[in-house]
Image (spheres, helix red, strand yellow):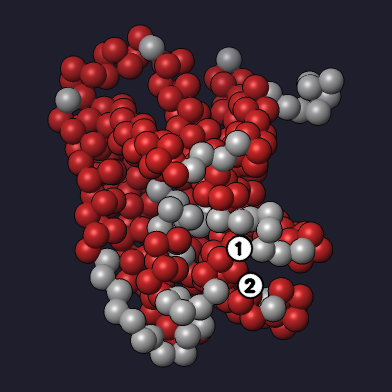
Amino acid sequence: MLKLLALDRFTILLIVMVLLASFLPVSGVAATVFSVITSAAIAILFFLHGAKLSREAVVQGITHWKFHVVVFTFTFALFPVLGLIAKPILLPLLGKELYWGFLFMCFLPSTVQSSIAFTSVAKGNVASAVCSASFSNIIGMFITPILVSFFILGQSKHGFDPTASILQITLLLLVPFILGQILRPYVYPYMLKLPSLVKAFDQGTILMVVYGAFSSAVVAGLWNVLSGKTLLILTLACSIFLTIIMLLAFYIPKWLGFNKADQVAIFFCSSKKTLASGVPMAQILFIGQPLGMIVLPIMIFHQIQLMVCGVIANHWSKQSETELE
């Protein structure tokens, strides 16, 4: 039956994480501890990616400017434009606060850890994904507040200091990655002997992110703030929006002539929005506004994108393995 439904173990585990978070969300002190553990797992994951990639691959990733232009255009141009175009449809259906939240989601940078992890699982260009996801989050600390101030608040009334976020990204991503590069001669031989362990760590990190993020949404009142009808409309809007973006992210890199590894990385880096950076930014940018309503769209969109990307990444991974046989 599972084969007929095209479900594998990883997909089932993703569904289990969502169900577990819905009925047994981690909260309070436990959520703090879980967040620390997840951060440690992310740091280790970046360390492994640093150790796995050759210096030549890293240099190629940094200098792959066409790749980064495409991802940047999707994240900070195409997403916002589509969100603004959808205003006549979404505003009457969702109301002002929820539409603000939907538009805020469109202005956010891409995810970091899940973009890289999904790219790795799907055998994509991890070096370029690392550089692109990092750049997206750093530049997003400046671009997102400007877009919010111009298109949502009209005029920014509160300052925004990106220093802490930049420091956090640097410590969580770049430092472990650089350490992995430095220690690559000692670590990489062991990684070659344990490829299944590295893959399991990639997928395990994604499962932790899914559970932690969905728990936060549930604890914040995901199932209580809105009626079932409005929640269904919002979920459908997020699903349709993600479908449109993913179709564009799938075909445009092909039309532009990128190779398969780049196409995979562009797909995952271009189609996602960050919840981890989105909620803190919302708390700063929307002081005095209904924060729960504003962050709800990114909470729902984030869960949908992780579920869909998990299935796609695993499918492409199996497809890649089959092609090599």
Rendered image quadrant of residue 66 = bottom left
Q: SS for tag 1?
A: helix
Residue 169 % position (x, y) = 28, 51
Q: SS for tag 2?
A: helix
Specify the label residue 297 is tagged with: 1
Q: Residues within 10 Å of mark 2 (few under 14, many from 20)?
A: many
Residues under numbered marks 1 and 2 in contact, where contact means CB atoms less than 8 Å apart: yes
Residue that carries the numbered disc 2 in the rendered image: 98
**257 versus 240 height, above or below:** above
Q: Earlier in the sequence, mark 1 or mark 2?
A: 2
Name the side, left or right, on which 247 lies relative to 45: right
For image coordinates 18% across by 20% down, the residue present is: 185
**60 versus 161 height, above or below:** above
Q: Residue furthest top?
A: 193
Amino acid carrying mark 2 in the image? Leu
Residue 277 % position (x, y) = 40, 58
Name the side, left or right, on which 155 lies relative to 237: left
Q: Nearer the viewer, residue 290 or 82?
A: 290
Q: Residue furthest bottom?
A: 155
**35 versus 270 height, above or below:** above
Residue 225 % position (x, y) = 66, 63
Q: Quadrant of the N terminus?
A: top right
For image coordinates 75% across by 81% down, the residue present is: 92
Q: Nearer the viewer, residue 261 or 242?
A: 242
**Residue 213 in view here:** yes
Residue 60 % position (x, y) = 29, 44
